[in-house]
Image: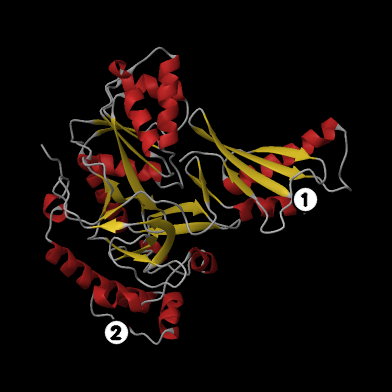
Amino acid sequence: MKQYYQKEIETASREQLKAWQDERLVRQVRHVWDNVPYYRKKMEEKGLTPEDIKSTGDLYKLPFLSKADLRDAYPYGLLAVPLEDCVRIQSTSGTTGKRVVAFYTQADIDIWEDCCARAICAVGGTKKDVCQVSYGYGLFTGGPGLNGGSHKVGCLTIPTSSGNTERQIMFIRDLSATILCCTPSYAAYIGETMKSMGLGPDDIPLKAGIFGAEAWSEEMRRDIETTMGIKAYDIYGLTEISGPGVAFECSEQSGMHINEDHFIAEIIDPDTGEVLPEGTQGELVFSSITKSAFPLLRYRTRDITTLTRKPCSCGRTHVKMTKPRGRTDDMLIIRGVNVFPSQIETVLLNHGYAANYQIIVDRVHNSDTLDVQVEMTPEMFTDNLGEISQRQEALVDGLRSMLGLAAKVTLVEPKTIARSEGKAVRVIDKRKI
């Protein structure tokens, strides 16, 4: 039996979806024009007024928003309602020490949780299920989003957050969890830990997993499904737009349905900004048409993907996006956290390391590792191991403060990291994803 959370919306006709999008886009453009001076100025620079946007056919006229705009407008410059109308902040790291901060009214949270509830129902979830949410809780959107969605469906929710893996497995078994929500790499690690404990698929009641926040391959999906005896589903989202649940996989497992009644998706040429025909690979751009507090229009995600409206066996009519195939910038996603080389460089420069460095990312036992190798300058070079260890620890602390995750730092002798005559090879990503 097919499961839906809001069947009439999820299976609405293309004509109905377009009518909703047309109406909501026009209203949203007026909302940001009236309440966001930053965005109004960007429209004026293009010679636009709200009257120029009469339907989704006019969407291409609007200016893009990027991560740079979010940094420039930090913290309140893109807020579209009085601060007292907001009830929550979520955040993700940016390319500098400043974080991207997103605001939510209660209505915004209700919409977000509805989107996550759709994702849970799409994998067969009902109020009879027990949903274990092992994404991190806090500023990161993963935990709060799926937690709220689970409540909307009526599942018994276990808010374990991440970590303490043996306890995770204990709760899965003792509390009969049927749906697991976490990053794919953590799901794989839970599976590996199960094996080491002598447990197999028949020893746990899980039937499905909703995994997102980082890139993962079809090979990794099959490995997780075999190890845990479940169906593994992808989920997509970003804090700037709301969080997980912007798009989600259904029983077909062939792409993620975008919640088109709340978000309009476009694919553009990342170099020219031109809107590309359906089915063409390019950069994904989102417009939030129902958010009140932090309504971003034509936000450039930098994710490379494809959209398709091919009919889906699950009955949902909302457009699908493929798994992102990469990014147009240099952002790395490590253990679900956005990491930019420029962030690491900032920490190194602040500690006086202006020389060569290299960032090595790998995946060991299904968990991402981050190793930063840094050349000491000739002035600071020493063979005093105690002093080197202290300097490495200072950098580890600085990176943890900047990135929100642990990195290994290795200080090496001057001129031991290979030079390049072209662009410096700053990042080596050894993960097979």
Label 1 crowd (10 A; few <14 / some 14-19 / many >=20): some
Image point (81%, 36%), residue name = 388
Judge the density around disc 2: few (<14), some (14-19), many (≥20) Cα neighbours within 10 Å: some
Q: Are marks 1 and 2 in contact (CB under 8 Å)?
A: no
Can you say which quadrant of the picture contains the C terminus?
top left
State the residue at coordinates (36%, 29%): 224
Question: Which residue is nearer to you in this view: 252 or 177?
Answer: 252
The mark that comes first in sequence, 1 or 2, is: 2
- Drawn side of residue 101 relative to residue 316, left or right: right
Which residue type carries mark 2?
Answer: Asp
Q: State how many labels appear.
A: 2
Q: State the SS at label 1.
A: loop
Q: Identify the mark at residue 353; answer none if there is no mark.
A: 1
Residue farthest toward the front in the current orientation of the protein: 421
Quadrant for the N terminus in the image: top left
The disc placed on residue 52 is: 2
Q: Do we see residue 81 in this rendering? A: no
Rendered location of residue 314, percent (x, y): 15, 45
- Residue name at image x 40 percent, y 65 percent: 299
**Percent of width and height locating residue 25:** 26, 71
- Percent x, y of residue 242: 36, 55
Compared with 387, 348 (above or below) is below
Viewer-side residue, 218 vs 81: 218
Q: Secondary structure at mark 2?
A: helix
* Amino acid type of the residue tagged 1 in the rendering: Tyr
Give the colour scheme of this rendering: secondary structure
Mark 1 and mark 2: span between their CA atoms? 51 Å
Location of residue 402 in the rendering, given as x and y in whole percent from the top left corner: 61, 49
Looking at the image, can residue 1 be seen? yes
Q: 58 and 100: which one is in front?
A: 58
